Amino acid sequence: MTLAPGSGGFVSETESRQLAFDLEQKPVGKPTAAAVDLLIRATLDAHEPALELPAVRVSGRMRRTLGSYMPSRKQIAISSRLLAMGEEDDIRQVVLHEVAHAIVHARWGDKPSAHGREFRAVCGEIGAKPRRYVDVTTEQWSSQVRYLSKCGHCKVLIVRKRRMQSVRCVCGLKLCPRSWRAVARAEDESGDWVML
Ligand SMILES: [Zn+2]
Ligand SMILES: [Zn+2]
């Protein structure tokens, strides 16, 4: 059984009962950060070309934080929930906020205060909002989260809206999954799921 294509971001409870995968389908991966890396590189090329940053780290552990910059490793990290479920402009603003931190660190080191004069100036340069926080609406995210487990008998992946105690697989076996992995539908509407 495969996922019906074009069913959009939301699935009804009845549909979600039937959701399952074949093993031939692509495994569940992390949301892609390629577009984020391109945005970072393009911004640096225009405003701080000598600065090299490692590829953005996609973090499934960030809960209250959507992005971060670690100066010691020059590492920008982005929440996988933001990448998978955030609006394009919200992702852009979070990324530019962290790029601004990286540029401030490259130019002035540890001296400036985190969101001080230098930070606001760099934000103005690169088109980030010169604020301490990026406002991102996350209320709808929880309704998009699904939970995934695997049938130990037929190896089909099972997707549900909740971490259920027991579930019946398409093969007929009743399962009591020990673990459910949080996933969301991929932004590209391929029907794939990405890990959160
Ligand atoms: Zn900040
Ligand atoms: Zn099964």
Image (cartoon, helix red, strand yellow):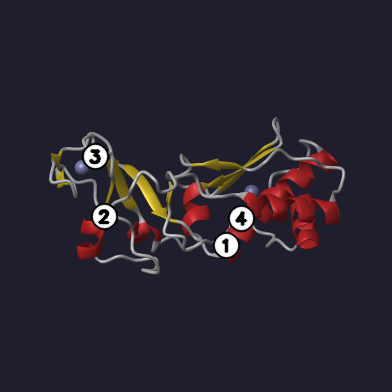
Do callouts 4 and 3 mark residues in contact (Cβ within 8 Å)?
Answer: no
For discs 4 and 2, the disc positioned in front in the rendered view = 2
- Which quadrant of the figure contains the N terminus? bottom left
* Picture layout, residue 110 above or below residue 14: above
For discs 1 and 2, the disc positioned in front in the rendered view = 2
For discs 2 and 3, the disc positioned in front in the rendered view = 3
Q: Which residue is mark 2?
A: 161
Amino acid at circle 3: Cys
Instruction: Report, in whole angstroms, how far the alpha carbon at label 4 lies from the one at label 2.
Output: 28 Å
Do callouts 1 and 3 mark residues in contact (Cβ within 8 Å)?
Answer: no
The foreground one among 18 and 133 is 18
Decide if ligand 2 comes within 8 Å of the CB at mark 3.
Answer: yes
Disc 2: CA contacts within 10 A as few (<14), some (14-19) or many (>=20): some
Q: Which residue is mark 4?
A: 94
At 63% from the left and 60% from the top, the residue drawn is 93
Amino acid at circle 4: Val
The quarter of the displayed image where residue 151 is located: top left
User: Of marks 1 and 2, which one's residue comes earlier in the chain?
Assistant: 1
Secondary structure state at the residue bearing disc 3: loop
Disc 4: CA contacts within 10 A as few (<14), some (14-19) or many (>=20): many
Instruction: Report, in whole angstroms, how far the alpha carbon at label 2 lies from the one at label 3.
Output: 21 Å
Instruction: Report, in whole angstroms, how far the alpha carbon at label 4 lies from the one at label 1.
Output: 6 Å
Q: Which residue is mark 3?
A: 154
User: Of marks 1 and 3, which one's residue comes earlier in the chain?
Assistant: 1
User: Of marks 2 and 3, which one's residue comes earlier in the chain?
Assistant: 3
Left or right of 52 in this view: 88 = left
Residue 59's spot in the image, x, y percent? Answer: 52, 41
Q: Which residue is mark 1?
A: 90
The foreground one among 86 and 164 is 164
